[in-house]
Image (cartoon, helix red, strand yellow):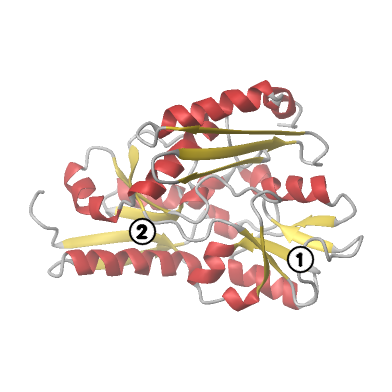
Amino acid sequence: MSAQPKRLVIATRQSRLALWQSEHVKARLEALYPECRVELLPMSTQGDRILDRSLAAIGGKGLFIKELETAIERGEADLAVHSCKDVPVDMPAGFDIAAIGEREDPRDALVSGRHTSLASLPPGARVGTASLRREAQIRCRRPDLDVQSLRGNLDTRLARLDRGDFDAIILAAAGLRRLGLAARIASLIDPEESLPAVGQGALALEIRSGRDDLKAWLAPLDHEVTAQCVRAERAASRSLGGSCQMPLAVHANRDADRLHIKGLVASRDGTRVARAQASGDPADPEALGLALAEALRAQGADEILAAIPA
């Protein structure tokens, strides 16, 4: 490894969850390199500022990371810490994911003060989510529910639930756990009922391409099993043209010597669903992701995606 770093700057969004994630990485780096000064550069992104329209309508998840990438490009920051599910599967030229941190609970969580599960929600109950993936899977199983768009950071969404705008909201369990809010979870949703998003629960560390020194410094933060799973998930999504404009779910897990992956493509109203799964060698996760994408195509995924309005 090259000489240890003297100073590292982490670009981060300003939300409480984003700051927690960046502080977590900062603490890991300080433990690895005691003589290094690690600083945070909090920034507001376009995705944080525009809350009155869906992500699909304003350009996708890349709006959460563009300003952070600009800070890296200008030399104002060395790396950015992201929720992996917010990182587009097609990285912009000049940027790489240097490490993927160990995954938290990847499941979706139902949050409600009055109801304990999706099944217990009465017909017409108002359910909030910002995810077309979640919306499609809810509509598939509970077409009688009123699913509405809910944008904003985690605290904003919880506040809207608490003031009665919704009967329940669906959030990533990982974020709630990381912020010490696990008690707000009414129930965890089984992946068979709501398959997680690509990369859900994992952290991605983004750097400029060609920074071999920085990649070596960040290597100890790369969690092998999580990285294999996420690489498989992202490969499947990339093959299918995955973006936040489509209801697409992919989730992988690994046992002793096999990687297992499941995927789902659905119409937004949940009336058409393609499901598939595959298993393969953990040493070649991208190949497994491509195999899953082909299996989904065999179930009609391309036709479902082609019918989704641009």
Q: Quadrant of the C terminus?
A: top right
Whether residue 39 is visible, yes or no, is no
Which type of secondary structure does the marked residue at label 1 adopt?
loop
Three-letter code, disc 1:
Ser
Q: Residue 239 location in percent, x, y?
A: 53, 27
Is 279 positioned to the left or the right of 76 in the image? right
Residue 284: image quadrant is: top left
- For label 2, the crowd category at 10 Å Cα-Cα, with few meaning under 14, some 14 to 19 and many 20 or more, is many
In the picture, the disc for residue 11 is: 2
| Relative vertical location of residue 284 with respect to residue 183 in this rendering, above or below | above
| Relative vertical location of residue 94 with respect to residue 18 in this rendering, above or below | above
Say which of 15 and 300 sits in front: 300
Three-letter code, disc 2:
Ala
In the picture, the disc for residue 117 is: 1
Q: Residue 90 location in percent, x, y?
A: 46, 34
Q: Give the residue displayed 13% in from the left and 62% down from the top.
A: 6
Q: Give the alpha-carbon distance from disc 1 to disc 2, as whole Å.
A: 37 Å
Is 179 positioned to the left or the right of 1 in the image? right
Q: Give the residue displayed 53% in from the left and 32% down from the top.
A: 236
Is 9 positioned to the left or the right of 82 in the image? left
- For label 1, the crowd category at 10 Å Cα-Cα, with few meaning under 14, some 14 to 19 and many 20 or more, is some
Count of numbered circles in the view:
2
| Relative vertical location of residue 131 with respect to residue 150 in this rendering, above or below | above
Which type of secondary structure does the marked residue at label 2 adopt?
strand
Q: Give the residue displayed 33% in from the left and 63% down from the top.
A: 25
Q: Give the residue displayed 84% in from the left and 52% down from the top.
A: 142
Whether residue 83 is visible, yes or no, is yes
In the picture, the disc for residue 279 is: none
